[in-house]
Image (spheres, helix red, strand yellow):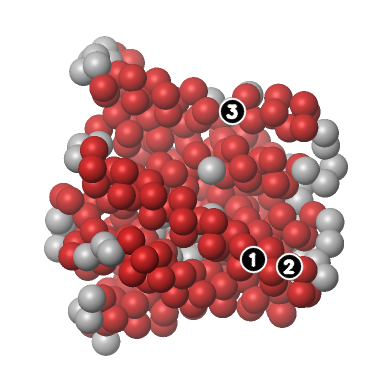
Amino acid sequence: MGYFWYILINNIVPIGIMISIGVVMYKAFRLDIKTLSKLNFYVFSPALVFTKLYESEIDLQVLMQILLFFLLFFSLLYAMVEVVIRIKGIKGGMRSAMRNSVLFYNSANYAIPLNQTVFGGNAYTLSVQIVIMILQTLIPNTFGVYSINAHKSNLKAILKMMLSLPVIYAIPAAIVLRYFHLQVPHSVYLPLQYISGAFMATALLTLGVQLGAMKWEFKLFDVLTSNIMRLAAGPALGFLVIWMLGLYGLTAKALLLSCAVPTSLSSVLLAIEYDNEPEFSSQVVFSSTLFSMVTIPVMIYLLDFM
């Protein structure tokens, strides 16, 4: 029960406050959602990825384990979503919206504080979560962009869109600088840190603005289907992959917990930026975050049996 109240007070309430501010700001000033979306995609997100990757410290062997886990987990999650999409007969832009709502999960502003709460501020588990966060930032900006535009644009146009996103270049730049121990000048790195620190706030405010603008006509069955796949089936598949790879200890626990978090704001930002089911995407993020108040404490309890 203690975990429930901790998650409510330290995860749900702060997120809810930021989202509420966004709703109020939209009602008062009719903020331009497209401008906020572009700030997230082209400024805040690349700065966050660059600084976290540049600062991260993790053993190469552990890094390879995490990458292998993520590849298998993401593949199984994708296969599950595709089966559900075909069974339900989902068409058009709703296919990619449903897919993104399950594949992209909140590995940053929800998962990082949750990780540090559950594991008592452990630096190792934090490094594991940061790797997952970086992967979960890269994929929406590559596969996510392709997925959401595949039904309405040709491959050349989609590739052009992806190559215009700064995060594509932020990742290799951070890796090269980190590998060769090249120091970024303080006058350059300081503003990057300021910008990356603003990512969470602007992303949550953007979600609030989107929620304030939408009609609230819930696609109830679709939203619940997404929530079940994200919050229940996702962790189950994560456990399966951990068992298949023979992972154990803190690595296994940190990875399993990372699979259980709600839908990422990335799905909303993609939906807004490319005008693809933004109301459904916003509803999924909102509802999955609320439902996680129940599912996350259950997951934390199960970690003790690993």
Residue wearing tag 3: 165
State the SS at label 2.
helix
Distance, label 2 to label 1, CA atoms, is 6 Å
- Near-viewer residue (190 or 232): 232
Does label 2 or label 3 sit earlier along the sequence?
Answer: 2
Q: Badge 1: few (under 14), some or many (20 or more) residues near its Cα, within 10 Å?
A: many
**Alpha carbons under labels 3 and 1: distance apart:** 26 Å
- Say which residue label 1 marks: 81
Residue in front for this viewpoint, 191 or 305 = 305
- Residue 72 seen anywhere in this rendered image of the structure: yes
Q: Which residue is at a point 83% across and 37% down the rendered structure image? A: 153
Residue 231 lies left or right of residue 282; in this view the side is left
Q: Amino acid at mark 3?
A: Leu
Q: Quadrant of residue 145?
A: top right
User: Which residue type does callout 1 highlight?
Assistant: Val
Spot occupied by residue 44 in the image (x, y as percentages of width and height): 47, 34
Position of residue 18 relative to residue 147, above or below, is: below
Disc 2 + disc 1, Cβ < 8 Å? yes
Please state, as top left, top right, bottom left or bottom right, where the C terminus lies in the image: bottom left
Q: Give the distance between the C-alpha atoms of the residues marked 2 and 3, in whole angstroms.
A: 28 Å
The numbered dot on residue 85 is: 2
Q: Residues within 10 Å of mark 2 (few under 14, many from 20)?
A: some
Q: Amino acid at mark 2?
A: Ile
| Element class at badge 3 | loop
| Left or right of residue 102, residue 11 in this image | left
